[in-house]
Image: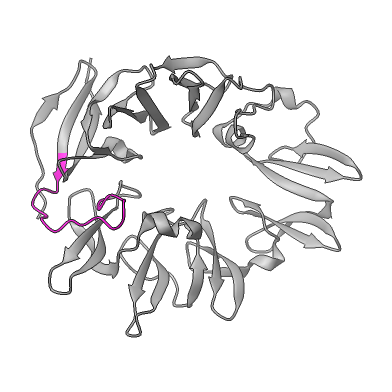
Amino acid sequence: MFILFPFLRIESKEYIIKEFISLDTITNLKSFGSYSPVGDFHYNRSRVDILDEKSDVILRGYINKKGEWIVHPYYSAYEIDKNIRRNFDGDYHDGIAVVSLLDSDNIVKWFYIDTLGNKLTDQRLNWLYDFEDGYASVSIYMKGVYYINTKGEFQNRLNFGLDRYKNIFSYKKDGKYGFKRFDGTIIKKAQYDSIEFCGCGYVNVSKDGEVFLLDTLWNKIEDINELDLCDEMINKYSTRNCYLNIKKTISCKYDILEPFSDGLGCVKEKSGASAYLDRNGTEVIRFDKDTVCFSFNNGYAKIMVNKKYGLIDKHKEIVIPVEYDYLGNTYEDGIVLVSKEHKYKFLKIEIASE
């Protein structure tokens, strides 16, 4: 069903592009809604949606990087655009994916599977989120809202409050907020009037009328201008028209197109020209108004010109020509999903030796 191509095709002096996996032989690939029938690789797995010719139903499975079915098409394909409200997308996150099945009463049942297709839990879930940093929030039928870890273990979310960062959760006691770990270990006792996770491990708190920032060791930061900002923090302080850098405001002459990722953010000027800014607000890559930019991921970013897509690196060098009808968003191990005339394949990027 899948064909691997051993030959090389040199695109430039810096990059070698291999045709890695071709899906041309799958004649029953089927889009559900406006989304691609094939997904990017996440945790060495890519989702593939096909039309089952016997039942005339779209089914979802997952392949590995050899083009082999690891999870055969069995699950119900759901329209991702319409399920964003549930905060899942069908891809693997932290080695766990959200799948669904229609039961005999035509009721959709949602659950998690690991990279081998094993169910994470048998609990009936009303709603669920993708995993992030090892945890996800779920609603268990007739039991309430919980956090679940990648081992399938639950903790009652209400014990922790409504906010978290990685494995640190907030909790509320006697009208004050503190912090716990997933296992319930108290890190900071409830003493703050309000808390907000700012990204990068920093927390904004208020106590006795004073607002200040705590560092990753829970110490008060005296001078926030000394912070080394990360993408999370800049994105956290984004407004509708400006990227807010804690040290300064990145110029409001830009409209935000895509969040900061890999240290660069995609913006658009009022004139229509787009650019990538670094964390200090300096333009490092600039395009004319005919080019649309997207977030960097694993060192690459896609661009669109005249409704065709290609891939660039951080030096604005063309890695994959701007000629495809579709190009994926994440590039795990340099593997890129592309399509042209409804034919899908994965390309593999390698850096040429000097």
From which residue to which does the magenta span run?
A: 20-38
Q: How many marks?
A: 0
Rendering coords of residue 207 (x, y %): 87, 45
Q: Residue 36 in magenta?
A: yes
**Residue appearing at x 52%, y 30% in the figure:** 256
Rendering coords of residue 177 (x, y %): 79, 55
**Residue appearing at x 38%, y 16% in the figure:** 288
Rendering coords of residue 284 (x, y %): 46, 15
106 relative position to 226: left or right: left
Q: Residue 288 in magenta?
A: no
287 relative position to 142: left or right: left
- In the picture, the quarter occupied by the C terminus is top left
322 relative position to 111: left or right: left
The image shows residue 15, relative to residue 38, as above or below, that is above
Residue at the bottom extreme, as displayed: 105
- In the picture, the quarter occupied by the N terminus is bottom left
Rendering coords of residue 30 (x, y %): 21, 57
